[in-house]
Image (spheres, rainbow, N blue to C red):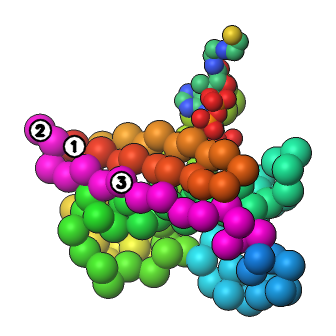
Amino acid sequence: MVIGVGFDLSSTASWKSLLDEGRTLAIEEMFTPAELERARQHPEGPAPRLASRYAAKEAFIKAFGRNDLALREIVVERRENGAPYLTFSDQLLDRIPQIRTFSFHLSLSHSRTTATAVVVIES
Ligand SMILES: CC(C)(COP(=O)(O)OP(=O)(O)OC[C@H]1O[C@@H](n2cnc3c(N)ncnc32)[C@H](O)[C@@H]1OP(=O)(O)O)[C@@H](O)C(=O)NCCC(=O)NCCS
Protein backbone atom coordinates (compact mmCIF):
# COMPACT_ATOMS: atom_id res chain seq x y z
CA MET A 1 0.00 0.00 0.00
CA VAL A 2 1.30 3.46 -0.90
CA ILE A 3 1.65 5.50 2.26
CA GLY A 4 3.36 8.60 0.89
CA VAL A 5 4.50 10.44 -2.23
CA GLY A 6 6.91 13.36 -2.30
CA PHE A 7 8.17 15.55 -5.12
CA ASP A 8 10.76 18.30 -5.01
CA LEU A 9 12.84 20.41 -7.33
CA SER A 10 16.08 22.22 -6.70
CA SER A 11 18.00 24.83 -8.67
CA THR A 12 21.26 23.48 -10.07
CA ALA A 13 22.48 27.08 -10.42
CA SER A 14 21.99 27.74 -6.69
CA TRP A 15 24.19 24.76 -5.84
CA LYS A 16 26.81 26.02 -8.26
CA SER A 17 26.74 29.41 -6.49
CA LEU A 18 27.11 27.76 -3.08
CA LEU A 19 30.12 25.82 -4.37
CA ASP A 20 31.62 28.95 -5.98
CA GLU A 21 31.22 30.78 -2.65
CA GLY A 22 33.15 27.96 -0.93
CA ARG A 23 30.23 27.10 1.40
CA THR A 24 31.62 23.61 1.89
CA LEU A 25 30.70 23.34 5.57
CA ALA A 26 27.03 23.93 4.80
CA ILE A 27 27.22 21.36 2.00
CA GLU A 28 28.98 18.78 4.17
CA GLU A 29 26.20 19.09 6.75
CA MET A 30 23.66 17.89 4.18
CA PHE A 31 25.54 15.12 2.36
CA THR A 32 27.65 12.10 3.30
CA PRO A 33 31.25 11.85 2.04
CA ALA A 34 30.14 9.14 -0.43
CA GLU A 35 27.40 11.39 -1.82
CA LEU A 36 29.88 14.25 -2.22
CA GLU A 37 32.35 11.98 -3.98
CA ARG A 38 29.67 10.74 -6.40
CA ALA A 39 28.62 14.33 -7.08
CA ARG A 40 32.20 15.27 -7.98
CA GLN A 41 32.26 12.50 -10.59
CA HIS A 42 29.56 14.17 -12.73
CA PRO A 43 31.04 15.53 -15.99
CA GLU A 44 29.49 18.96 -15.35
CA GLY A 45 30.82 19.17 -11.78
CA PRO A 46 29.05 18.47 -8.47
CA ALA A 47 26.09 20.90 -8.79
CA PRO A 48 23.65 18.68 -10.77
CA ARG A 49 24.03 15.75 -8.39
CA LEU A 50 23.94 17.90 -5.26
CA ALA A 51 20.74 19.48 -6.56
CA SER A 52 19.10 16.13 -7.41
CA ARG A 53 20.11 14.56 -4.11
CA TYR A 54 18.92 17.56 -2.14
CA ALA A 55 15.60 17.28 -3.98
CA ALA A 56 15.51 13.55 -3.11
CA LYS A 57 15.99 14.24 0.61
CA GLU A 58 13.28 16.90 0.58
CA ALA A 59 10.96 14.64 -1.42
CA PHE A 60 11.52 11.88 1.15
CA ILE A 61 10.62 14.25 3.99
CA LYS A 62 7.40 15.18 2.17
CA ALA A 63 6.51 11.55 1.49
CA PHE A 64 7.31 10.45 5.04
CA GLY A 65 5.46 13.35 6.60
CA ARG A 66 8.06 14.33 9.20
CA ASN A 67 10.23 17.41 9.22
CA ASP A 68 12.42 16.55 12.20
CA LEU A 69 14.97 14.64 10.12
CA ALA A 70 18.50 15.81 9.34
CA LEU A 71 19.16 15.79 5.60
CA ARG A 72 22.45 13.92 6.07
CA GLU A 73 20.55 11.00 7.66
CA ILE A 74 18.73 10.41 4.37
CA VAL A 75 21.23 9.04 1.87
CA VAL A 76 21.03 8.57 -1.90
CA GLU A 77 22.96 5.57 -3.19
CA ARG A 78 23.38 4.31 -6.75
CA ARG A 79 22.91 0.82 -8.20
CA GLU A 80 25.37 -0.59 -10.74
CA ASN A 81 22.95 0.31 -13.59
CA GLY A 82 22.82 3.94 -12.41
CA ALA A 83 19.43 3.77 -10.71
CA PRO A 84 19.30 5.72 -7.44
CA TYR A 85 17.88 4.41 -4.17
CA LEU A 86 17.48 5.61 -0.60
CA THR A 87 19.26 4.40 2.49
CA PHE A 88 19.32 5.83 6.01
CA SER A 89 21.88 6.47 8.72
CA ASP A 90 22.05 3.97 11.58
CA GLN A 91 21.03 6.77 13.97
CA LEU A 92 17.85 7.42 11.99
CA LEU A 93 17.02 3.70 11.80
CA ASP A 94 17.51 3.42 15.56
CA ARG A 95 15.35 6.48 16.20
CA ILE A 96 12.55 5.48 13.81
CA PRO A 97 12.69 1.64 13.48
CA GLN A 98 9.43 1.76 11.50
CA ILE A 99 11.51 2.88 8.48
CA ARG A 100 12.90 -0.66 8.16
CA THR A 101 9.41 -1.96 7.45
CA PHE A 102 8.78 0.28 4.42
CA SER A 103 9.88 0.13 0.76
CA PHE A 104 11.14 3.28 -0.91
CA HIS A 105 11.18 4.21 -4.59
CA LEU A 106 13.22 7.13 -5.89
CA SER A 107 13.60 8.67 -9.33
CA LEU A 108 15.87 11.62 -10.18
CA SER A 109 16.37 13.92 -13.14
CA HIS A 110 18.58 16.94 -13.67
CA SER A 111 19.27 19.60 -16.28
CA ARG A 112 21.68 22.55 -16.34
CA THR A 113 19.16 24.65 -14.41
CA THR A 114 16.99 22.29 -12.35
CA ALA A 115 16.96 18.91 -10.64
CA THR A 116 13.88 16.96 -9.60
CA ALA A 117 13.15 13.96 -7.42
CA VAL A 118 10.13 11.77 -6.73
CA VAL A 119 9.86 9.46 -3.73
CA VAL A 120 7.14 6.85 -3.18
CA ILE A 121 6.86 5.01 0.13
CA GLU A 122 5.08 1.65 0.40
CA SER A 123 4.22 -0.27 3.52
C1 LIG B 1 18.64 6.28 -17.55
C2 LIG B 1 18.17 7.40 -18.47
C3 LIG B 1 16.69 7.23 -18.72
C4 LIG B 1 18.47 8.76 -17.79
O1 LIG B 1 17.80 9.80 -18.47
P1 LIG B 1 18.50 11.17 -18.88
O2 LIG B 1 17.50 12.02 -19.54
O3 LIG B 1 19.78 10.87 -19.59
O4 LIG B 1 18.97 11.86 -17.53
P2 LIG B 1 18.10 12.46 -16.32
O5 LIG B 1 18.77 13.71 -15.89
O6 LIG B 1 16.64 12.55 -16.60
O7 LIG B 1 18.29 11.35 -15.22
C5 LIG B 1 19.56 11.10 -14.69
C6 LIG B 1 19.33 10.25 -13.47
O8 LIG B 1 18.66 9.07 -13.85
C7 LIG B 1 18.95 8.08 -12.86
N1 LIG B 1 19.27 6.84 -13.54
C8 LIG B 1 20.39 6.51 -14.22
N2 LIG B 1 20.29 5.25 -14.67
C9 LIG B 1 19.10 4.76 -14.25
C10 LIG B 1 18.43 3.51 -14.39
N3 LIG B 1 18.99 2.50 -15.03
N4 LIG B 1 17.22 3.36 -13.83
C11 LIG B 1 16.64 4.37 -13.14
N5 LIG B 1 17.23 5.58 -12.98
C12 LIG B 1 18.44 5.78 -13.54
C13 LIG B 1 20.15 8.58 -12.06
O9 LIG B 1 19.68 8.98 -10.79
C14 LIG B 1 20.60 9.78 -12.85
O10 LIG B 1 21.12 10.80 -12.06
P3 LIG B 1 22.55 10.65 -11.39
O11 LIG B 1 23.50 10.19 -12.45
O12 LIG B 1 22.86 12.01 -10.89
O13 LIG B 1 22.40 9.66 -10.29
C15 LIG B 1 18.92 7.37 -19.83
O14 LIG B 1 20.29 7.57 -19.63
C16 LIG B 1 18.71 6.07 -20.59
O15 LIG B 1 19.35 5.06 -20.35
N6 LIG B 1 17.82 6.09 -21.59
C17 LIG B 1 17.55 4.90 -22.38
C18 LIG B 1 17.22 5.26 -23.80
C19 LIG B 1 18.40 5.88 -24.48
O16 LIG B 1 19.52 5.47 -24.29
N7 LIG B 1 18.12 6.91 -25.24
C20 LIG B 1 19.13 7.67 -25.90
C21 LIG B 1 19.36 7.19 -27.30
S1 LIG B 1 17.95 7.30 -28.33
Which residue lies under the disc numbered 2?
1
Residue displayed at 60% across by 77% down: 30
Which mark sits nearer the N-terminus, 1 or 2?
Answer: 2
Residue displayed at 85% across by 50% down: 44
For disc 2, the neighbor class at 10 Å (few under 14, some 14 to 19, many from 20) is few
Q: Check the image and name the residue furthest to the left.
A: 1
For disc 1, the neighbor class at 10 Å (few under 14, some 14 to 19, many from 20) is few
Name the front one of labels 3 and 1.
3
Residue displayed at 46% across by 64% down: 57
Which residue lies under the disc numbered 3?
7
Asked if residue 24 is positioned above or below residue 43 in the image, the reply reads below
Q: Which residues are magenta?
A: 1-16
Q: Quadrant of ligand 1?
A: top right
Name the front one of labels 3 and 2.
3
Q: Amino acid at mark 1?
A: Glu
Q: Position of residue 83 (x, y in %)?
A: 58, 34
Q: Secondary structure at mark 1?
A: strand
Quadrant in the picture for the N terminus: top left
Most common secondary structure along the magenta stretch: strand
Q: CA distance from mark 3 to mark 1?
A: 15 Å
**Callouts 1 and 2 close, C-beta under 8 Å:** yes
Which mark sits nearer the N-terminus, 3 or 2?
Answer: 2
Q: Position of residue 123 (x, y in %)?
A: 17, 45
Q: Check the image and name the residue furthest to the top.
A: 81
Which mark sits nearer the N-terminus, 3 or 1?
Answer: 3
Q: CA distance from mark 3 to mark 2?
A: 18 Å
For this rendering, which residue is in front, 38 or 111? 111
